Image: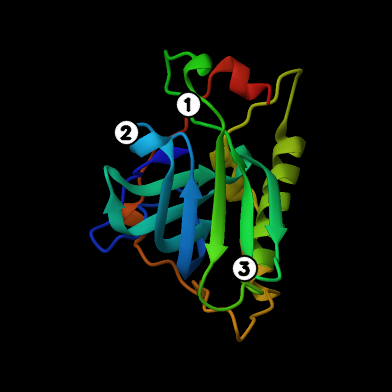
Amino acid sequence: MAVNPQLFENGMPVPFVNEIFVLSRDGVEFEIDKITGSHGGDVKAKGTIYLSNVRMVFLANKHVGNFNAFDMPLLYIHGEKFSQPIFFCNNLSGLVEPVVPENESRALYSTHSFKILFKEGGCGTFIPLFFNLISSVRQHNRLSISGMEPQINPLQASQTPVDEMMRHAYVDPNDPTRIFLQQPTPQSELRRRTYHLSPAERSI
């Protein structure tokens, strides 16, 4: 994960090379803990979720202190759970491991707990695509592991069969999710970057 990832002026996340944005979903409330600089470490904000073949990015409608957006690589998410409570809105919760900068200790970073609450409309399009993507990303990672130590690189997710998933996606008329039929930014604006992992993270 990363706080305040790079964004275009219109708020769209700047994509990685070979990253494909699948959808965006407005009208969500996002909760995350252990954010440095926020009051008590907990942040709650309303905004938009972007889902790609590499990560999930939350973009807040308004800044909460120095918090504007949050980047969660799909390979770092675990313990995900979709809940449909009777008296409250549907929500997706889980844990996400931190991205530890090079030359820093993993002990300085804690696992985050997150929750996405779907405040406006259903989520019959978003949820199946999310679970299909995260399953495909994990399967690809298992197949790409060579040797004794797994190389968990979130950008390997770019090899997942996103086009196939989108062709067969069920579109729920009650779900305001917007599916990207073409990518919103030209190839020339893609950034070349990698996530850096500590040896301990590679063993997750």
Q: Secondary structure at mark 3?
A: loop
Q: Secondary structure at mark 2?
A: loop
Q: Residue at the far left: name it.
A: 9
**Cα–Cα gap, marks 1 and 2:** 22 Å
Exactly how many numbered labels are in the figure? Answer: 3
Residue 105 locus on image (x, y percent): 48, 13
Q: Amino acid at mark 2?
A: Gly
Question: Can residue 111 be seen by looking at this rendering?
Answer: yes
Please identify the quarter of the rendering in which residue 4 is found. Answer: top left
Please identify the quarter of the rendering in which residue 144 is found. Answer: top right
Residue 203 locus on image (x, y percent): 68, 21
Compared with 1, 48 (above or below) is: below
Give residue 123's mark.
none
Q: Amino acid at mark 3?
A: Phe
Q: Is residue 60 left or right of residue 199?
A: left
Quarter of the picture containing the C terminus is: top right
Q: Residue at x 27, y 56 (%)?
A: 8
Specify which label sits upstream in the sequence, 2 or 3.
2
- Judging by the rendered image, the residue that carries numbered circle 2 is 37
**Front residue of 146 and 104:** 104
Q: Residue at x 38, y 56 (%)?
A: 59
Labels 1, 2: front one: 2
- Judging by the rendered image, the residue that carries numbered circle 1 is 196
Q: Is residue 154 left or right of residue 168?
A: left
Q: Amino acid at mark 1?
A: His
Q: Residue at x 28, y 52 (%)?
A: 63
